[in-house]
Image: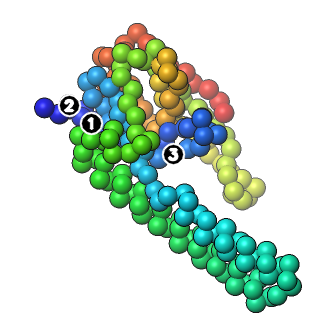
Amino acid sequence: MAEEILDKFDAHALMFEQGEVKRSCTLFFARTRIVVAIPEGINPKVGIAVLIGFGLVLAGMLLMNVALFIAGLAATFSISVFLVLVNSVVQYRSGRRMKRLSLDEILREGKGNFEIPYQDVVKVVHATVKRHEAYGLSRFFLPSFPATTHLIDFVTPKGKYVFMVEGIDALRIIELIRPSVPERIEEKESEG
């Protein structure tokens, strides 16, 4: 019999071992563990096509050939846009497919998927970070409103797992894990 999924939430995992990369993921909560599913995109080796286009740009510059330079720019731009779109579609479909699988199937499905057993959790930190900055040109011309980010850190002997979630989801996640790790939950609020 498959383990029952109590709830699932879309989130972003902060991957510190990859240079603090933010990856979309889905958190599946069960009675004994959390399974994290990170949808996979296209193979990064396909990016070699962009390098070939960039090589055409450089060759056009070195040979002072305007046609080759423009062809290289056009190829690099169109290949890049195409790969980004294809990668988005592949990740979206992979994420939707994983939401229909059992927890064990999710773990087998992707090499980046992993589980966090509640028995391994040393501490859970729910941090509410209020930021007062705006991004882009609007910060110069328009007033910015404070933005709130909810971070949930699961600290285990193997490492620290940090997830960014929506406010209402953060509260629901804390309520889901409270029966399993009640004395290990810590609440924080800070200005960022």
The span from disc 3 to disc 2 (Cα, nearest Å) is 26 Å
Residue 104 versus residue 149: which sits nearer the camera?
Answer: 104
Relative height, residue 119 to residue 97 (above, below): above
Mark in front: 2 vs 1: 1
Q: Are marks 2 and 1 in contact (CB under 8 Å)?
A: yes
Residue 85 versus residue 192: which sits nearer the camera?
Answer: 85
Q: Are marks 3 and 2 in contact (CB under 8 Å)?
A: no
Q: Are marks 3 and 1 in contact (CB under 8 Å)?
A: no
Q: Residue at x 76, y 55 (%)?
A: 140
- Which quadrant would the C terminus be assigned to in this image? top right
Label located before the other in sequence (2 or 1): 2
- The amino acid type of the residue labelled 1 equals Asp
Relative height, residue 185 to residue 15 (above, below): above
Q: How many marks?
A: 3
Label located before the other in sequence (3 or 2): 2
- The amino acid type of the residue labelled 2 equals Glu
The span from disc 2 to disc 1 (Cα, nearest Å) is 9 Å
Left or right: where 16 falls relative to 181 = right
Residue 185 in view, yes or no: no
The numbered disc on residue 23 is: 3
For disc 1, the marked residue is 104
- The amino acid type of the residue labelled 3 equals Arg
For disc 2, the marked residue is 3
Residue 129 percent across, percent down from the top left? 58, 32
Residue 155 percent across, percent down from the top left? 50, 20
The numbered disc on residue 183 is: none
Mark in front: 3 vs 1: 1
The residue tagged with tag 1: helix, strand or loop?
helix
The residue tagged with tag 3: helix, strand or loop?
strand
Q: Residue at x 64, y 74 (%)?
A: 77
For label 1, the crowd category at 10 Å Cα-Cα, with few meaning under 14, some 14 to 19 and many 20 or more, is few
Q: Residue at x 49, y 35 (%)?
A: 163
